[in-house]
Amino acid sequence: MMLPSQRTVVLGTVLAAGLVELLPWRPAVLVTVAGLWLVLGAPAWLCRRISTRVASTREAQWLLGLGFAVLAAMVAALAVNTVLPWFGVSRPLTAASLAVAQTLTAAALAVVDRRLTGTSPPVRAPRLMPVRDVAPVAVLGLLALTVAIAGAIRLNNGFTGATSLVALFLVAALLGLLFVQADRYGDGVLACGILCAATALLLLTSLRGWFVTGHDIQREYLLFQLTSAKGHWDVSGDPDAYQACLSITLLPASLAQLTGLPGLAIFKVVLPMLFAAAPVAVYRTTRNLTSKRISLLAATYFLAFPTFFTDMPFLGRQEIAFLLLGCAVLALSDRTAPRRARRIAFTVLFAGIVLSHYSTTYVLIGVLLLGKLASGVIRVVPPLRRRLAERAPKEATDFVAWPMIGVAVLCSALWTGPVTGTWHQLQHTAAATAQGLFHPDQVQRGSSDTAYSIFSSARVSPQQRLLDYAESTRASTGSAPPLALRAAATQVAPPSKLPLTAAGSALDQLGLDVPRINALLRTWCADGLQVLLLLGLAGTLVATATVFRPTHDLFVLAAGGLGVLAAELALPQLSVDYGLLRTFQQGLFGFAPFIAMGSVWALSWLRKRWRMPAATAVALLLFLDLTGALPRLFGGYPAQLQLDNAGQYYDIYYAHPQERAALAWLEQHTAAQRIQSDRYTLSRLQTLLDGRPGDDIYPPLVRPGSFVLLGYPAVRKGEVTVFYQGDLVTYRYPLQFLDATKNKVYSSNGTSVYR
């Protein structure tokens, strides 16, 4: 009897899942499974088969399949949103229409698969990895995931962060296991281990809070709610740059409709889990060039960079963009696949980045342009050309051709211009940057992130930032501060640190200054990553070892990323608008292989048998320090959101029930259309405000007769945070100013309202 082909079976399951979505009565679990299969599972399987033309390894094919599936889901939802209104459908984003669109998408992918790869083989049992290899990684990975989820939930319930701390050490143990058994484990096992480690790290942060927790995610979630409520994505009414990101509007709306999952679950779980594949792409990219252990080093450095686990879980649009970017770099680095197919894949994925996130697009265009310039220099300087030619003799021309960059620029210009009209953010950045170039006397200060660079100038103090903010406020209002404020000028609040633990106290008794050591370690980690990057790039040009053979294209990609970082250091407005640390995280897709190899070359003074173990130990120690495990173990360091119910991120991003209750009281008892509060309290509550604007409560801005809502940190700690010139500044709020000018009309355990 002839067995059905794999493609036929997949299409049959897609049709069954589509029928489930159309049934009037559907079990919730069945709907979730059917929806995930329609949106991600089946398209990823079909795209994985198509990706055999682009990538030569199973891990790379599955990663590319996932990236193309996410892109296909956004395009399918966009098609539904665009076409159905032509026929008078005012709410096109329904489960039925999206199910039909995803079914047709799967059918189209199956046609492409058949044309490119021919008849698929009959269904066979999947090839399983040896149990002796899978079991330790699976057990430790699942344990790390379980403990990470439990740690976040315990913190949300008011318990300590001890469980979350254990989760970090379990993740480090998992990475250590992968390093020790690298020779024994296959690439698939190592990739699964990295995926578990990345997911646990991200969930430690993303699951914090019972409501929306974080910075950009609060605005992203509001836009998702508006899109879902209208059943239609319409950017014309709100030409905000965020609205142009289909990764936070149409993609989660499609997932919500087809899976039945609540929006919070999509933003707090699904998007971070998709982004967890990015470090696996870094591993696979590096593995195309060198050994397993050096590739594990690259993935570990990507995971350990603080932006990965502190900020990326709050940036849904950039999580999706980085997933697509990781897939694009993977296509660039696979030398065994046909170049034409890889170029097409890279260009298609770049178009997906354009749909997902504007700043990732702009930074990547800058990287490619500067990379082309670096390539031109390398090819005209004989020693450099000869050295790289010895490493990759088949690369006579650049992978990224000028037409590809032209297509990328055109896609970005069309999407942010005629299609969505959201080019104002880029226009503002360009205008402010030009002003800084042509009017140096009027240039603003750059973000304090630049202080982490080994090439930066002296850091601007928080007090100076506050003075700059006060002067800017005075200039905008055109008036002197109120009399009540002059007697209580605002001052920067000193950063609070956790008390020393028992282990920290023991070190303190030995004469060790634990807080100072923590600060020095963090500085050394930041400086060390940059030194290792420079060492890796320089070593590539001079070293004769054959263990690391980066392609010319990956080298110039890293050089272009270094050029973008230099531009942000030189032009303050770029660091304010795009963030130096987020740019470095993006650059790690190209930097990580060179940082990993640089860490090995830095230890070349050791015997050969000890170099890799020493490099592994350094990477794991850096991981434990940057993730906050070591500082939390000893104390004497500012609290971090994933480990404590304290710290700056907890104060400004964690939504409290008392604040929501106070806003509900205001909505019920007042007719005020504009409520004054600090920026971050308004941000935490914006899903309840439905996007209605509010005013800041910096004292010169407080209006007579207005309602002033003091959030949790202002009431409990007397502190308020402002965001100015790309920097967070926390200052002591003069509560006596409100007491002297207004009456308290509402008070609860952590919130007050003045009138």
Image: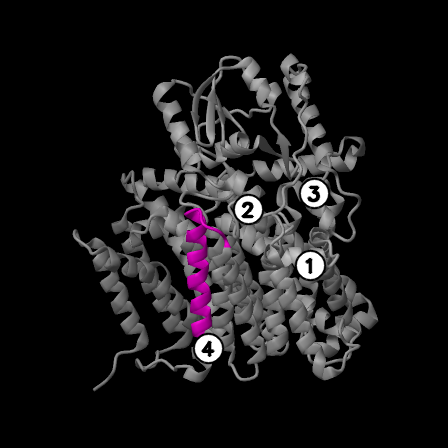
Could you say where residue 235 lies in the image, as x and y percent from the top left? 44, 37
Q: CA distance from mark 4 to mark 3?
A: 43 Å
Name the residue beneath numbered marker 2.
Answer: 358
- Looking at the rendered image, the quarter that the N terminus falls into is bottom left
Which of pointers 4 and 1 indicates the residue nearer the eye? Answer: 1
Please report whichever mark, 4 or 1, sits nearer to the chain's N-terminal start.
4
- Give the amino acid type for the residue marked by disc 1 in the picture: Leu
Q: Which residues are magenta?
A: 138-161
Query: Do tag 3 and tag 2 residues touch (Cβ < 8 Å)?
Result: no
Secondary element under disc 1, as helix, strand or loop, is helix
What kind of residue is marked 3?
Ser
Front position among marks 1 and 2: 1
Residue at the outermost front position:
509
**Mark 2 Cα shell of 10 Å, populated few (<14), some (14-19), many (≥20):** many
Q: Are marks 1 and 2 in contact (CB under 8 Å)?
A: no
Q: Which mark is residue 448?
A: 3
Say whether residue 378 is visible. Answer: yes
Which mark is nearer the camera, 1 or 3? 1
Towards the viewer: 246 or 309 = 309
Q: Is residue 64 visible?
A: no
The residue that label 1 is drawn on is 507
Q: Amino acid at mark 2?
A: Tyr
Per the model, the C-alpha gap separating discs 1 and 2 is: 47 Å
The residue carrying pointer 1 sits among few (fewer than 14), some (14 to 19) or many (20 or more) residues within 10 Å by Cα, namely some
- Distance from Cα at disc 2 to Cα at disc 4: 41 Å
Q: 61 and 157: which one is in front?
A: 157
> Between 206 and 578, which is closer to the camera in this rendering?
206
Image quadrant assignment for residue 284: bottom right
Which residue in the structure is indicated by mark 4? 136
- Per the picture, the main secondary structure of the magenta-coloured stretch is helix
